[in-house]
Image (spheres, coloured by chain):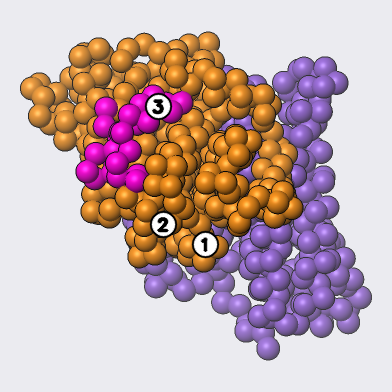
Amino acid sequence: MEIALQQIVNGLTIGAFYALIALGYTMVYGIIRLINFAHGDIYAVGAFVGFSTYGLLALLHVESPILTTLLALVVSMGLTGLLGTLVYRVAYRPLLHARLSILISAIGASLTLEYSLLLIYSPSFLVYPHLFGRAGPSFAGVSVSWLQILIFVSSIVLMAAIYFIVNRTKTGMAMRALAINQDAARLMGVNVSRVISFTFFLGSTLASFAGVLTGLYYSQISFLMGFLIGLKAFTAAVLGGIGNIPGAVVGGFMLGILESLAAGYYSSRWKDVVAFAVLILVLVVRPRGLLGERVVERM
Amino acid sequence: MRNVFAVATLLVFLITGMVPGVGAQGATIKIGVPVPLSGGNAKMGTDIVQAATMAADEQNAKGGVLGRKLEIVSFDDACDAQQAVTAAHKLVDAGVAAVAGGYCSSAAIPASAVYHDAGVAFVADASSNPKLTDQGFENVFRVIGRDDQQGPYAAGFMTKDLHAKKVAIIHDNTLYAKGLATATQDALKKMMGVQVVFFDAITPGEKDFSATLTKVKSLNPDVTYFTGYYPEGGLVCKQFKDLGVSGKLMAGDANNDPTFIKECGAASTGVYITSTPLPQDQGTAKAFISRYTGRWKQDPGPYSALEYDSVGVVINAMQRAKSADRAAIIKALQATSAYSGATGKITFDKKGDRVQVLYITYIIKGDKFVPTGM
């Protein structure tokens, strides 16, 4: 029982990362039907910007771990959000109506970001400061660190905020309108380009939040860190129903827990096989994902 | 650190560009160095190229070999089988006289077939999977030990020095890691009263191994041996302590890097690493280290001295053969005997493996690798 609980805690932690990144995939897909391959690398950039911020603050002798972390998060989310918008403006906007070219452009953006990080920073691994120890409450033999609790709670709060923005604000309404019919939305006076930019901004801030927390929690970042987790987060978005915001969250946590349980009770060599077999099963039964709705085909 | 890669690449280009201007008699003799220069192991690749460049430059300062200058030609193999084969073809096409380098076994083994077909000697500096020399290629040599030598050594250390009864082994499914894990498991199985309670792999490139380690925790091992590479090793170390797994943590020679300690932080104290001795723990390497740090303004990596010797035995072979002909170099390399390099005496056996390889166990204390026992 103890082991099962610990595995679920492990799964929720990694699931929170998947969910935060999956949201970016799902929002962009929902609006312009693009699989943004560069999104995983946006997450990596977020981690690196956070790393630089920590370095800068250390030079300025700002030492309070809470203050530096808050600043690192804010700076990283702001800058990475802007970078996300920039990637959209440069690499995607000119190609919005060329479906194949935009996909290639996305792969290009991904490689550009990865290798810019390599050249600007380092080809090897960088190590975040060890700010938060592994102390934390322990109940029934399950060890949970405060950092894990912070990751879980803050990701839930952020996801709720996104849900609120999309469903309760005017910009959110414009985003939803775009998702249904771009031309109609434009005719109703929606500034299409600005709304899409904003979507990229939101998705990128979430990814960079995940990036900084990755650095703090796992302590290791590298220029290729976004590749594998980007793939997994994309999977989580599909599992939950791509284009659907609560779906991305459910998909992220579900994939995390599935992987943990597969590694814990079967074999970690087979965990991806088990997790993806479940994914295929889900998609066979519900082709649009767990929470995906029937969307009217475009064209 | 961040410019090391750029500087190394630039240097390779510079040297390539400069050599014709130097005006040596005849064309240069090219030595190929395939290493990962991109991807997670790029730092190791940079260390290796620096060592090779230094070996070649030192020889050139002495007048080169057979009156010709040496030139290091390096291509990125990205630790990837396909890219390694491409890099190998590029090196062969570039007209290298011999190849000395490589890092990941999973890249070196497929590449070795290309060198074999082209009749080019291949001296591996860091690839320790037994299969590399077990293929029966007469052109393949290595200056590092084999995993099936390190495995029994590690098994001996954990049972004799750490008195382990229950051992967990974690690898990462790459050729090197799996080979070392299997060799260790086989050696442990032959011992009385020792049980391998866990044998499984993690996925390289991932960051969260807590699910696997939670399972290990439930089995209460006396020793957990991680045989993968240091990027994951540091994470395994940190999460091992975070989850409070019982017993000691031990790791294979690919974790012998300061990044391991940085990633794991204070929790790394007391972790054991089996390895060939680091350059600083070998009397023969003292001069090499001071020249290396003088030239590159950084400490040599764990494989720098081995690469320096790989290039060294190739130079030595050319001098003995009095030829830079590919076939002549292979013949001369086979006869390499008691070459004294930075890592000690090098003699190749029939398979091309180095005879008498020394292993040592380090314990991490206060951010340093401290030797504990031979």
On what subunit does the disc labeled 3 rest? B
According to the image, label 3 marks what residue? B340
Instruction: Specify few, some or many for label 2: CA neighbours under 10 Å numbering under 14, 14-19, or 20 or more.
Output: some
Disc 1 residue type? Gly
Q: Are marks 1 and 2 on the same chain?
A: yes
Quarter of the view holding residue A194? bottom right
Looking at the image, residue A127 lies above or below residue B3: above
**What kind of element bears circle 3?**
strand
**What kind of element bears circle 1?**
loop
According to the image, label 1 marks what residue? B95
| Point 58% across, 42% down: residue | B64
According to the image, label 2 marks what residue? B326
User: Is residue A90 in sight in this rendering?
Assistant: yes
Shown in purple, the chain is: A
Q: How many marks?
A: 3
Disc 2 residue type? Arg
**What kind of element bears circle 2?**
helix
| Point 39% across, 42% down: residue | B320
Looking at the image, residue A103 lies above or below residue A63: below
CA separation in Å, label 3 and label 1: 28 Å
- In x, y percent, where is residue A120? 75, 44
Q: Is B329 displayed left or right of A145 in the figure?
A: left
Depth check: give the residue in front, B107 or B64: B64
Depth check: give the residue in front, B241 or A166: B241
Q: Which residues are magenta?
A: B332-356
